[in-house]
Amino acid sequence: MTAEELKAKARACGADLVGVAPVARFKDVAPERNPAAIFPECKSVIVLARRVCRGSLRGVEEGTNFGSTYQCFGYTWVEDNFLSQTSYDLSLWIEEQGFEAVPLFAYSEAGMPKGVPVAPDRPAPNVYIDPRFAVTAAGLGEVGLGGFILTPEFGTRQRFAFILTDAELEGDTVRGKSLCGDCGGCAAACPFGAIHLDQRETLDVQGHEMPVAQVDIGLCAVCPNGAFLASGRGKEPDRIAAACGRECLVRLEKAGKLGNCFENTFRKREPWQLDALKRPMTRDASGAMKAADVGCGKFSGTGVVSVHATGQVFSK
């Protein structure tokens, strides 16, 4: 079984993207995030992706439909049904070739439940592979300043899954950073100021360094502007359809950086925003976003929010 044969089969199973990372690229990754902790004989990490169709974002962009467009066809069904079927079918094919295959969801570890280590030298279950590191290590994309995984084909619009195998496959070349221009548009679009451009960490994959801003996922969890927190996925909300994610997509398309092109632009109207109390926000003469007054002025604040440790949201 060659890498070329594997990729051809992956595409036949519905994958839009497929890349391979030799497990040696994870040698410096902590056991809690390392594929070898799950499958010690693993030699290759296969990364699969299925695209999020741009139309599934349309209802969120217009502010008129969330659940039956993006939440299903852009998020949960893509991961739980469409991509998982691709992963399962490809895993069966790999095992028909005589190699073991371990299919995994590309979930974030943040807030996921942990068990008890079965031995002193083993990490606690469940071990979760870092999607940002794995996707970059497999040569499929990069991590932008706002924390989004970006590919040259679809930008922010894809879902990932992994297959660990003891087949030794040729790895793909790790890409340098070429899509994210560190413009900060994602942070500017966030009505809650949850993306802190002045607080950054560096993700290093095979010598390719990518600065990533700190994101306050507590604020994202209460954001009504297209962020989704699905059950069983920990506490890190999905932000592809949020104000920040849609702004990133708009800028990547406008710059002509994506391979999946369209006749018409994605953004056709001024983007809407809600504050933490779900009040529409409007732009004043200075360009600042403020919450519109509601009723007889009961909630006539500026729309600036803070989140208490208890999870309560306060408007100032």
Image (tube, grey):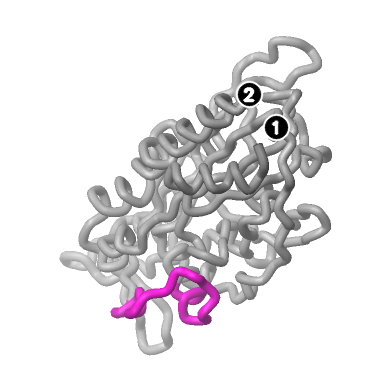
> In front here: 64 or 103?
103
Picture coordinates of residue 141 (x, y %)?
62, 59
Is the residue 113 above or below the residue 190 in the image?
above
Q: Measure the alpha-carbon separation of dots 2 and 1.
A: 9 Å
User: Do residues under tags 2 and 1 come within 8 Å of each other at their CB atoms?
Assistant: no
Q: Residue at x 70, y 37 (%)?
A: 44
Is residue 220 something one can see in this rendering? Answer: no
Q: Residue at x 64, y 66 (%)?
A: 197
Picture coordinates of residue 226 (x, y %)?
36, 57
Q: Residue at x 47, y 65 (%)?
A: 244
Q: Residues within 10 Å of mark 2 (few under 14, many from 20)?
A: few
Q: Quadrant of residue 200?
A: bottom right
Q: Residue furthest top?
A: 118
Residues in magenta, as a range: 250-270
In the rendered view of the protein, which quadrant contains the C terminus? bottom left
User: Main SS type for the magenta part?
Assistant: loop
Give, as a three-letter code, the residue at label 1.
Ala
List the residue tagged with mark 1.
167
Give, as a three-letter code, the residue at label 2.
Gly
Is residue 247 something one can see in this rendering? Answer: yes
Residue 259 among magenta residues:
yes
Residue 98 got which mark?
Answer: 2
